[in-house]
Image: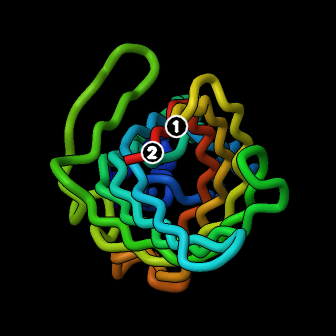
Amino acid sequence: MANQEKQTGDQPAPTQKLGQPVQIEGRSPTLSDATKFTFGADYNHAFASNWSLEVGLFYQNKGNKYTTAGIEYTAIAKSITTPVMVRYSVLPQYLSLGVGAFTSFGVGSVNVVETPGKTYDETYEKVGWAKFDYGVVGGLRASYPVFQGLDVIGDVRYYLGLKDLNTDPATSNITEKSKDIAVLVGVRYAL
């Protein structure tokens, strides 16, 4: 898919890098986030009153969705993400804010879906994406105690990548950084 020529009529289209906006037929394709999936676990250790250190390990699908020359593409890359955050409990046992850093490493292949109906897997190299990413993360967590030592939680996190993920020499003038929102729901229990 990456660096693949697209034909529209008698004129060849410019080389299209997966996930990059290019001019085709005088207008830019639309670019939006694709549906993503995240699951994993955090370990939280209190080190002072209202302060804690949190380390996590998550499986995430990251990617984007765009339309070029009338064809819709969705590209999803699988990754293992490790956030490390310092949390401050604004309302102990109910509300906390977290800020920190993350690393993310791509695993497997990138799943590409062309609409209508064509699905295939590509390597990170072929789609022009770096496998390794890093950046900053911030989050807001709400929790509700159900039983002693067991809480139901909702966590919203924003991941902002700092690394340029574009590895395609043909589009080296384009910077591509990750930006992801994760909405997590689960349980927390005291060990």
Where residue 32 appears, as percent x and y from the top left, is 66, 43
Looking at the image, can residue 47 be seen?
yes
Secondary structure at numbered mark 2: loop
Crowd tier of the residue under label 1, counting other residues whose Cα lies within 10 Å: few below 14, some 14–19, many 20 or above: few
Can you tell which mark lies on residue 42?
A: none
Residue 26 shows in the view: no
In the rendered image, residue 13, in percent from the top left (x then y), is placed at 50, 52
Q: Is residue 76 above or below residue 24?
A: above
Identify which residue is drawn at 39% across, 73% down. Answer: 103
| Left or right, 79 with reference to 125 | right
Q: What residue does disc 1 label?
A: 149
Q: Which residue is mark 2?
A: 190
Residue at image point 69% right, 74% down: 49
Dot 1 and dot 2 residues touching (CB under 8 Å): yes
Q: Could you classify mark 2 by the number of other residues whose Cα lies within 10 Å: few (under 14), some (14-19), or many (20 or more)?
A: few
Looking at the image, which residue is at 52% across and 77% down? 101
Q: Position of residue 112 (x, y in %)?
A: 33, 36
Q: Which one is nearer the viewer's eye here, 179 or 151?
A: 151
Q: Earlier in the sequence, mark 1 or mark 2?
A: 1
Spot the residue most to the front. 148
How far apart are labels 1 and 2 at the CA level? 5 Å
The furthest residue to the top: 117
Report the amino acid beneath label 1.
Gly
Closer to us: 123 or 56: 56
Which residue: 44% across, 39% down?
A: 38
Image check: 144 left or right of 130? right
Instruction: Say what amino acid the circle numbered 2 marks.
Output: Ala
